[in-house]
Amino acid sequence: MRALVPALAACLFACGSAQHPAEPKPDVRAEVRDAETAEKARQHDVARAKYEHAIADARDPESIGYARGRFGETLATWGEYKESIAQLEGSVAAYPSDPAPWHDLGLVREHEGDSRRALDAFEHAVALAKTDWRPRLAVAALRWKLAARCFRETVGDCTHEVTVAREEYRAMLDLDLPDRLREKVKWAIDQLALPRAGLGPASPAGS
């Protein structure tokens, strides 16, 4: 799976690691491959037409999920985020057992400011790929972001938001992580144990 634009994510869910990847019919796979070849050559109009043709030819759930998921990912790289979300939602509706489009859907929803629904998509990916650290990292990072938002936007108790973020990072330590990432996860856990989750002092009233 190709990387999405950097603004969307620092890591991308790899199709090869999916526990239940979609297995499309050979003709649909070939049409998507042709679309991706055109996209790599920056022939975007050709690529779009080939993706749309693949979707039109897809009849079974796995082929529909595969074609829409790949097109949705590509649309995100083109900056067509609403269209990307529509295709990715169509992908997971057709074939909900592939974690890759769930993960990509989370990335694009988060990019569009829909953090809660992004979290739902990421958690679907985690449930489908329990041994892969990438969707778990996406959930952990987003939960830390939501904890930070709680501290910025409310005067109430943010204990729950911090606790669930720490739990996600702790769960990552049970996975097979690259050494450098493992150290970063430990750092995140330590930061979340600090007052205000290491986010600095509260702003003075009226500032």
Image: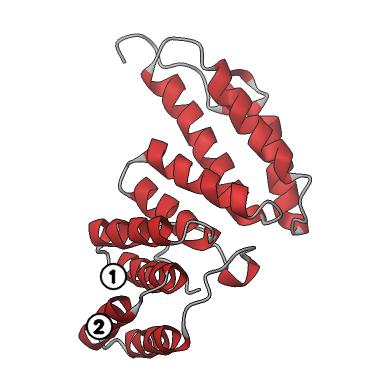
Q: Secondary structure at mark 2?
A: helix
Q: Quadrant location of residue 82?
A: bottom left
Q: Residue furthest left?
A: 45
Residue 73 is situated, as x and y percent measured from the top left of the image, at 38, 67
Position of residue 106 in the picture relative to residue 20 (left or right) = left
Residue 192 is situated, as x and y percent measured from the top left of the image, at 63, 28
Q: Residue furthest front?
A: 60
Would you say residue 11 is visible in this rendering?
no
The residue under the point 34% across, 86% down is 35
CA gap, disc 2 and disc 1:
9 Å
Return the residue nearer the eye: 184 or 54: 54
Position of residue 204 in the picture relative to residue 82 (left or right) = right
Residue contact at pointers 2 and 1, CB within 8 angstroms: yes
Q: Which residue is disc 2 drawn over?
A: 44
Position of residue 137 in the picture relative to residue 175 (left or right) = left
Identified by mark 2, the residue type is His
Residue 45 is situated, as x and y percent measured from the top left of the image, at 20, 84
Q: Which residue is disc 1 drawn over?
A: 78
Would you say residue 95 is visible in this rendering?
yes
Q: Is residue 71 above or below residue 110?
A: below
Q: Quadrant of the C terminus?
A: top left
Identified by mark 1, the residue type is Trp
